[in-house]
Image (cartoon, coloured by chain):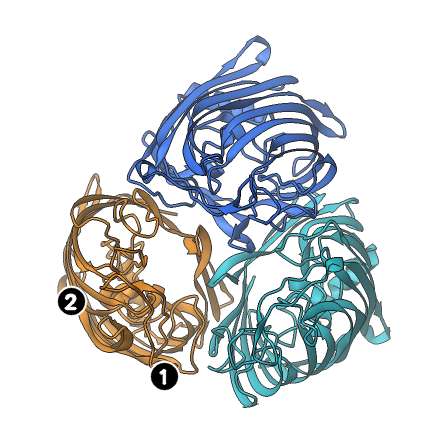
Chain colours: A orange, B cyan, C blue
Amino acid sequence: GYLQTRYTEMLGGDEGINLWSDRSVGDQNSLGDADKNYLIRRARLVFQGDVGDRLSFYIQPDFASSAGTTGNVAQMRDAYGDVYLTTDRVHRLRVGQSKVPFGWENLQSSSNRLALDRADALNSAVRDERDLGIFYYFTPKGVQARFDEINKRGLKHSGNYGMFGVGLYNGQGANRGDRNDNQHVVARVSYPWKFAGGQFFEAGVQAYSGEYVPSTAAYRAPDDVSLTPTIADEFRFGYDDERVGVSAIWYPQPFGIQAEWNWGTTPGLDVATNSIVEQDLEGGYVQAMYKLDHRFGTFLPFVKWQYFDGASKAENNAPLNEVNDLEIGVEWQIAAPLELAAVYHRMNRTNLVTGNRAGRIDYRRFEADALRLQLQLNF
Amino acid sequence: GYLQTRYTEMLGGDEGINLWSDRSVGDQNSLGDADKNYLIRRARLVFQGDVGDRLSFYIQPDFASSAGTTGNVAQMRDAYGDVYLTTDRVHRLRVGQSKVPFGWENLQSSSNRLALDRADALNSAVRDERDLGIFYYFTPKGVQARFDEINKRGLKHSGNYGMFGVGLYNGQGANRGDRNDNQHVVARVSYPWKFAGGQFFEAGVQAYSGEYVPSTAAYRAPDDVSLTPTIADEFRFGYDDERVGVSAIWYPQPFGIQAEWNWGTTPGLDVATNSIVEQDLEGGYVQAMYKLDHRFGTFLPFVKWQYFDGASKAENNAPLNEVNDLEIGVEWQIAAPLELAAVYHRMNRTNLVTGNRAGRIDYRRFEADALRLQLQLNF
Amino acid sequence: GYLQTRYTEMLGGDEGINLWSDRSVGDQNSLGDADKNYLIRRARLVFQGDVGDRLSFYIQPDFASSAGTTGNVAQMRDAYGDVYLTTDRVHRLRVGQSKVPFGWENLQSSSNRLALDRADALNSAVRDERDLGIFYYFTPKGVQARFDEINKRGLKHSGNYGMFGVGLYNGQGANRGDRNDNQHVVARVSYPWKFAGGQFFEAGVQAYSGEYVPSTAAYRAPDDVSLTPTIADEFRFGYDDERVGVSAIWYPQPFGIQAEWNWGTTPGLDVATNSIVEQDLEGGYVQAMYKLDHRFGTFLPFVKWQYFDGASKAENNAPLNEVNDLEIGVEWQIAAPLELAAVYHRMNRTNLVTGNRAGRIDYRRFEADALRLQLQLNF
């Protein structure tokens, strides 16, 4: 498992802001009893093993989850079994709660990511990246070997989710029950090339489709009144929720570049009519990075630009989520079990954390700068 | 531990129904954001060990429990120590939260049961089968050996809860505090015979007595109004809660039959007067099964009929629980770590899941058919 | 880890009382669905290890925590890494959620304490003894060896929190986000002497300072009305929260004595004005004990007197907490993994558990006697 402890120093910009994905970002005017100083972002323990040559299991709780107002309770992230249809592990079924194969960065472990959080554009596709269902993965032996090699060289691979994968899942996100009889369906192809000189390049395409039922709650509307969005009767059992995305990763040997983009349809709040409607979405990110092996450790400087013009269906009211952020940072692998990351983050985005507090309109756009630090322990 | 993933297909009958014990049963008109498609029913990890020759400990959390509206949090199932009064383990005290020795099926692990859920008639005796207290178990060495032999032969034993057991416990069920100064007391005798030809037969009798304090909440009464039941002052510290039951198991070598029945007194909702009163209860089940060892694995077809005319004290308002269900299914042990079960379930019972929703009367009787699937991973 | 199961028998005094730190104390007139009979007070599992010679990790969830009304869920206690600045472990940083080095008894594990609960006077300094931050500990090799020796002799040491320690932390207590931009700062010195004849004596001094933001909720005020305290605007981002304390431990070889006292400033409820204000606090405890090694095991009789005139900032409304309690008990270490403790507890204190129930004024002073039993399993 691993443990991520964070600390954020606000450098300027608007006050009282929140970053939904990291509660340590903000100041004492922020909503939601944010962790203005230290925060344990993730505390993961992994229980895994092979049982015979036909089954592997993987149980990963997170000890930094919340239940209502109670902090740091253990909640399931992964709980699945891999059933190997062939003992060479080329064909397998994954049953239970696991990552949905949509987006390379979504599949990459947070313990491997350079940026502190995933880009909203693709991360908004699946709440907590995971859902409950059944997935089939096809990984020829040559591709298995190549995935392994990328990973062993410290190039921060996404893990083996098949050269080809297809799955059926509930569609409401991790640890949530389904709310309609519809199932989401997803498919993904990803292929790793190895060029002369050993350079790896991976490219993929993925798509999913289903019907999503958003939750509603009171929020502070622009004229400082408390409103709860309406859902038209035709959408009672869900809005169209479908996306297609492309991914390309030139692994950092030593210079790397990584980019993903997706387009689709999503439920999203229309503040003007106070109703949730079907909306188009578009967005992605580009990241450049460099891997420098030094006697003081490995240094990975990076710069990441992300853009999103869509909505966050998994938050109450499916609010619009407009993002145009820049991150410049460096990860220092002091030793195998110890990583320190420092990131300058220039945010230009909407605030997804809602408080429904008089005088404070929800879902406003803000600009702010922050210095974000993370110490990660791997064990 | 083990992991149970389920999927249910409704085949017919009334719409909008719920099965309290399995949220994957139902359709999108069901109450309570049911998991209409996939569900992780149980995700258990066991931490156990011997410390010296006088103590064993057993800690079993479940990672598929809910806290309020937060899904898949870790909640304790077992947390106890066995203190061996004699090192031959004939006499022992079990202290902490553990299964209450009432009902053979209640004691059998869910990972061993053929039917997907326990029969309501005996399962309603103890919430989550467990409570907090102190239990004494007496198991002569010959009986220890016989219990072990039944288990090792794959005959799905209940585990060793003594040839004789007696205990004191809070009485409100697992993970709940007591609500009166009264303690529940339970006693059980179970004896395994081994006949010529090696056929095992086990029979038992058990009884408990105590005072139970039910919880109340608003529900939708028959005239479509929201009501909360009243509790008369004399019942402020509890209603009589006492039962006696009999059990008989002819182990499947290869044909088996298993039956249990119980009678007693319980708190139960009287809708006519909108009050909780003391009521009689009666019910049980009969199950026939067959064990077929084949080169494709072990197949255990079974048929189970259950009947209950009582109430479910552990649910809010202690509603009436009338059941007359038939299950026909088969468990396929594909390999030791992997079991697939398919069950046709004909339900004729009251809906215990309450929503207090206008136009939808709670606690109504319904009839429905479902095909229920479960994949179980043992590790 | 370890498991503590408790049972309390009330012997006399006022009825309907609660002891905030042990829900098994009280009777059926007590508030909050107390566990009037059996209670699992702590169920701890420890996941720890060294990763290389520069890092140790320590993850300790408790399985007897509550989330809202849901009992026995897993919640984080410790989640930290020790980063050794020098491989002789003289200099180290502890990052994550860990015990705040204020008070010797606070640092001692509950599995080692003779009394069933910590004394309120020092325990009220840090909710659940822990917070999230970064701590530096300095422990010369000679002091490391002496701490180890005290522990190995079964003298119930507090563990190694440095000869000198200093830290920055959020300040709102374990598993809670910070609520202002202020950080708490703590420092502690503790030195163990070894006298001729091998007698150990440890003495320490510690202090912390910060700004604490209390939570408010409705309570039953003296004239039987429901009130919620006001917080003046100047205290919106916190009240002064600072203490200094002294500790002295003459280890039981065989006779021992242990005493701590602290003074400071804290937010506290002023019932007369129904507002939370800054108040002085003072209190501590003195404990005498004896260690008797016998062929039936080790017996540790003890007597503890505690006094507190302060407030409990971590409870809603920061109510006054006045304590003048006497405990006389004995711990019997039947075997290494098994300890039984029996304590006569004479309580004279305010009731911190609030129910806001008509006719029952909150925060009243009470007197009561109880016989408290605990069985502890170590594994």
State whether residue B296 is above or below residue B81: below
Report the side of C43 relative to B204 (left or right): left
Residue under pointer 1: A233
Could you tell me which residue is drawn at 60 percent across and 72 percent down? Answer: B21
**Disc 1 + disc 2, Cβ < 8 Å:** no
Could you tell me which residue is drawn at 14 percent across and 65 percent down? Answer: A196
State whether residue C320 is above or below residue B305: above
The residue closer to the viewer here, A222 or A264, is: A222
- Residue C203 horizontal/vertical position (percent): 49, 17
- Residue A348 horizontal/vertical position (percent): 15, 57
Q: Which mark is residue A195?
A: 2
Three-letter residue code for mark 1: Asp
- Residue A299 horizontal/vertical position (percent): 19, 46
Three-letter residue code for mark 2: Phe
The answer to whether residue C357 of the structure is visible from this angle is yes
Question: Which of the 4 image quadrants contains residue B253?
Answer: bottom right
